[in-house]
Image (spheres, rainbow, N blue to C red):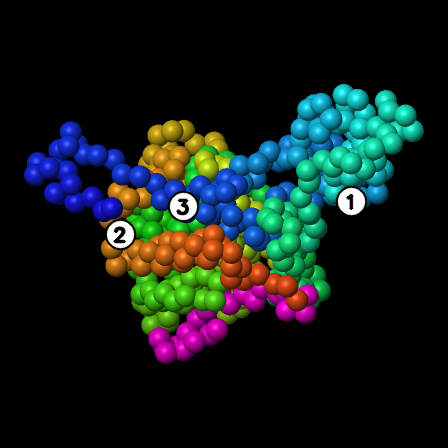
Amino acid sequence: MTLSIENQGSSGSAYDFVPGQALENLARVGRGTPMGEVLRRYWQPISLSSKATRTPQNVRVLGEDLVLFRTGKGKVGLLYPRCCHRGASLFFGGVEEEGIRCCYHGWVFDTEGHCLEQPCEPELGLHRDRVRQPWYPVQELYGMVWAYMGPPDRMPILPRIDVFEDVPAGEGVYADDSGFSGGGPAEMDFNWLSHWENVVDPFHVPILHARFSGNQFVPEMAVLPEVSYSYTPSGVRQESQRRLKDGRIFQRITEVVMPNLRVVPDVMMRTVDAPCDTLGWVVPVDDENFKIFTLFRADDPNLLKNMKATYSGRLWAELSEEEHQRTPGDYEAQSSQGKISLHTDDHLTTTDQGVTMLRRLMARIAKQVAEGQDPPGLFFDEADAVIKVSGGNYWVSDTTDDPS
């Protein structure tokens, strides 16, 4: 439903206004929801590897509360927190060489939930093999812990990413979970869809990040772009061209790859004429919170930290409420839509084509998964399990050039 003057009464008064609804099938991520089931079919980053230690960590992802730990032998485990014996949380457990020991009665579980020991039972538990603590498979890659939370018999291969393979000498691949580079909390306190669809909205850049709040990026980003959109085998791609006063044409190729990978070229133009070397995963914590896990390739592990936007020399967290109001960024614009935006109130126009295409794609894939099909972009052959990145910043001589 799209609201119009007729929906609100002839006066247009707020008295007659009836708020709309969220696109529940796209926004909600719990088990059994349409998009929740889509997200669970892919490997999701859930933590930096450095945070998986012998001290158990509470992790909430896709609306599920879990416990993450690393055994003394270095293996990472992700278990349901409520001990299957009598319910004490494994967050208070002790991590040992082979697994985690519950603080209540000492039952020990390995990283796949097998019960290894029941110390109060004869012979450490004659029937311990009959119980199993609920668990999820995890793998480590590029400095992050990835979890697969979908049906076990449909588990795909954790893919590699071409721009993070064969890294040149002097560079490394680094992981970050500190949130927006422009500012905001490390864990965003609103629904993930408000940020996810922002990735295919290039027109907010010259308005929000330039005309309204002052030029928060490089001057080239302040130019209103000419934009085209297309579907890819597993997402939506946008090509934005900015005609500069000196006659050059600056092209940005941005992609979203299902279900939640964002390929956004560097807004500070640190890298040009090369594929994007900074990728982000928009991972829902639950329906009203999400995190951004970022991988980047650079010669400086502190690159993202040093690129955090400042406002007259101060970080976002140091600004007053009035200063946030005067110079809003992505966090303010997106979080102010509400915990879960009322999407049916949106008046989408021609410049929202990317948003429309993405919503339609998500709904179509959710329907496919509900009907028992595999979503796009899964890999079941190790030889083919590579995500190829084509997004990036490019200089072009004219609009017919295609750098990809």
Residue 80 located within the stretch drawn in magenta: no
Residue at image coords 71%, 32%: 56
Left or right for 130, reference 383 = right
Q: Is residue 311 visible?
A: no
Q: Which residues are magenta?
A: 382-404
Say whether disc 2 or disc 1 marks the residue closer to the N-terminus.
1
Residue at image coords 46%, 48%: 35
Residue 34 position within the rendered picture, expressed as x and y whole percent measured from the top left? 45, 47
Instruction: Identify residue for label 3.
Output: 25
Say whether disc 1 or disc 3 marks the residue closer to the N-terminus.
3
The quarter of the displayed image where residue 194 is located = top left
> Cα distance, mark 1 to mark 3?
36 Å
Residue 267 position within the rendered picture, expressed as x and y whole percent measured from the top left? 45, 56
Viewer-side residue, 97 vs 126: 126
From what the image shows, is residue 277 above or below residue 53? below
Q: Dot 1, crowdedness within 10 Å: few (<14), some or many (≥20)?
A: some
Residue at image coords 67%, 44%: 136
Task: Name the kind of residue labelled 3 in the image.
Answer: Asn
Instruction: Identify residue for label 2.
Output: 348
Outermost residue to the left: 10
Local secondary structure at mark 3: helix
Residue 349 position within the rendered picture, expressed as x and y whole percent measured from the top left? 25, 55
